Image (cartoon, rainbow, N blue to C red):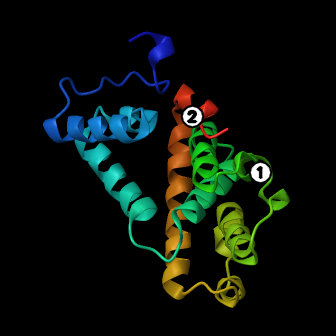
Amino acid sequence: MTTDDRVTALDLTPLDPLPAETQKYFDICEEKLGLVPNVLKAYAFDKAKLDAFTAMYNDLMLGDSGLSKLEREMIAVVVSSVNRCWYCQVAHGAAVRALSGQPELGEAMVMNWRVADLEPRQRAMLAFVEKMTKASSEIEEFDRDGLRAVGFSDRDIWDIANVAGFFNMTNRVASATAMQPNPAYHGQAR
């Protein structure tokens, strides 16, 4: 693997061969997405860590929730924008573009979500995750009540907090390891 092929700045050798179930998961990604996300390749040196990451990601982003897939991706992008996480801004910005059918929405989420044409529900949600990202210890009942006032249930608030928390963690790992987004993300859904 050349330096240009690395998905992170770390010299961690992927398992070779990949365990059968991991290879199957990567094949499904290739089939459905047209690529294996570099974040998965980055974790491929340790099956237990990859399995833990994918289980949490799949539960939060694809599992049952009162939040739409688009809303969860919007959270990912806003958190990543606040944290200036290159990998997640690119990857999840592409997901917002694709899910919304609006390229400008994905760009707004990355650059300044406040300029986007959003519903009051989405504005409240994104203000909450921005505050959570910048100053989580300052979240008060007033903030949760603001979410309730626009129709979020307590379960939804749990999901909002968990998606934001997950991306705060992954942003830090991606930034600390110089994780690179897949080049294909840049041109998707434009």
Badge 2 marks a residue whose secondary structure is helix
> Which corner quadrant of the image does residue 129 belong to?
bottom right
Q: Residues within 10 Å of mark 2 (few under 14, many from 20)?
A: some
Q: Which quadrant of the figure contains the N terminus?
A: top left
Q: Which quadrant of the figure contains the C terminus?
A: top right
The answer, for residue 46, to whether it is visible in the render is yes
The tag earlier along the polypeptide, 2 or 1, is 1
Q: Position of residue 56 (x, y in %)?
A: 37, 58
Q: CA distance from mark 2 to mark 1?
A: 16 Å
Q: Position of residue 115 (x, y in %)?
A: 85, 58
Q: Residue at x 57, y 48 (%)?
A: 95
10 shown above or below 171: above
Looking at the image, residue 112 sits to the left or right of residue 137; the answer is right
Q: Residue at x 82, y 61 (%)?
A: 114
33 shown above or below 155: above
Q: Residue at x 55, y 62 (%)?
A: 72
Q: Residue furthest top?
A: 2
Q: How many marks?
A: 2
Q: Residue at x 39, y 34 (%)?
A: 36
Task: Look at mark 1 in the image and give the residue it sits on.
Answer: 108
The answer, for residue 180, to whether it is visible in the render is no
Name the foreground residue: 3 vs 66: 66
Q: Position of residue 84 (x, y in %)?
A: 69, 44
Name the foreground residue: 72 vs 17: 72
Task: Look at mark 2 in the image and give the residue it sits on.
Answer: 185
Q: Residue furthest left?
A: 20
Q: Residues within 10 Å of mark 1 (few under 14, many from 20)?
A: some
Q: Position of residue 55 (x, y in %)?
A: 32, 56
84 shown above or below 139: above
Q: Amino acid at mark 2?
A: Tyr
Contact flag, marks 2 and 1 (Cβ < 8 Å): no
Q: Amino acid at mark 1?
A: Ala
